[in-house]
Amino acid sequence: MPKKILYESAVHQFLWAGRRLREGLARTDPARSTDLARWINALTIENPGTGAVRVAWSSPRPGEHRIEIKHAKFYTRGDAVPHYQRQAEAGLTFKDDQIMAQNRAFFDGELRTALVKAGLFTPDLGAREPDGRDSARKHAEEVFHDGWAAQTDVTKIDVRQMNEACTAPEMRHITRALGDLRGRTLLDVGCGLGEAAVYFALKGADVTATDISPGMCDAARRLAEHNGVTLKTHVSASEDLGFPSHTKFDVIYTGNTLHHVDIAATMPLLLKHLKPDGVFVSWDPVAYNPAINYYRRHAMEVRTHDEHPLTLADIRAVRSHFKESKIAWFWLSTLLIFISMKFVQRRDPNKERYWKKVVEEADRWAWLYWPLEDLDRVLLHIPFLRPLCWNVVIVGRSPRQS
């Protein structure tokens, strides 16, 4: 595709992403939709060089965002007609078009990133805002994760590596805590790309995976197919699963999900779907380590901006819903690996998700990880050091009746 046409196509797709978001907000928050329309109309959009679009704005917080066109999906000249002929022959419609879906998710994600930079979406959006703005927060989560899913080739994900590697201590601990999963029903809330959901299915569980992002649910299904297992997917926010009240599971698992939601509101809604003898397990980042907080401030392109790492009060709130609960802490001295990635290898935290890469590259880091994990076992006997860990795992049994 000629460079000028590619640039113009990217601009068109970005503006259409704005139109989709405006139409969605118009139903829930008309004032915010109007603000968004004004912001889009005042944008400066230009081509700063080959393969990019530069979007700039002067309010509410002046800034700019660069869109790398190479990450988008476009038909090249002459491809579209034969593609749609194949679609028709297979009985598919425009809604089944993966290139269109990936394109939409990518530009929705780019728009969302720009809105956060501009201050129209803020880190605490939804926590203290009216319901309409909470809808905008959820929409922002959806488009961000749709964009992530669109940029990921699930056939390259090694599911066992992601759950059994030395640098995946949380999942190794969770697997031991859950024991034999054969024949048990399991709900994965906030499934993402499906690495955990598919792993549990490989272990014999009957898995239902939910996510606020349709793109992530689709990725999880494709990852399951690639690994020869099946799972049911359900698009929903964690705060409103939409299941019938009688739907119950033996296990409810949430990985890196609770730090995106209102815990007080979400936990009772989740636990109404847990059997009386069921097990709840979660793992999330903790709020206190200064090194991790430095990383969070400098990795805003690969994170959602409404995250709120768990405090000790949050952990107590989760545990209060169970008659029996245990917690385990992970990544204290082992965080030296992340420091090495940043300051020794000089890897850009906005171009790589460190927490994914450290698992994918487990073999490379094993020589350092294993002795540091042994050191952590000693250090974590000191109670005041535990909240300085990166992640905490919570396992709850015997849910209290609400």
Image (tube, grey):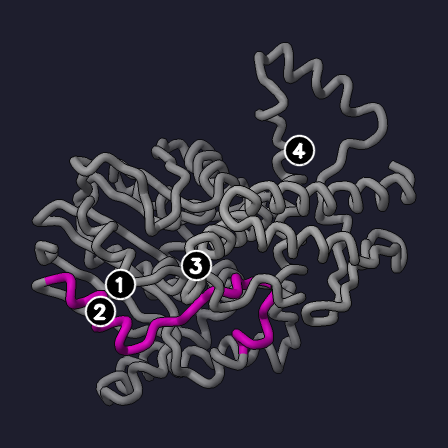
Distance Cα–Cα, label 2 vs label 1: 7 Å
Comparing labels 2 and 3, the label whose residue is closer to the camera:
3
Q: What residue type is disc 4 on? A: Ile
Q: Residues within 10 Å of mark 3 (few under 14, many from 20)?
A: few
Q: Which residue is mark 3?
A: 130
Q: In whole angstroms, how far apart are the C-alphas of marks 4 and 2?
A: 43 Å
Span colored in magenta:
295-322
How far from the left and from the top, in percent, is residue 131? 42, 54
Quarter-of-image position of residue 169: bottom left
Q: Which mark is residue 264?
A: 1
Furthest residue in direction top, as rendered: 89
Give the number of the disc on residue 347.
none
Q: Which residue is mark 2?
A: 317
User: Crowding at label 2, few (<14), some or many (≥20) Cα neighbours within 10 Å?
Assistant: some
- Cα distance, mark 3 to mark 1? 17 Å
Instruction: Reply yes or no: does residue 313 show up in magenta.
Output: yes
Give the residue displayed 20% in from the left and 44% down from the top: 273
**Mark linked to residue 99:** 4
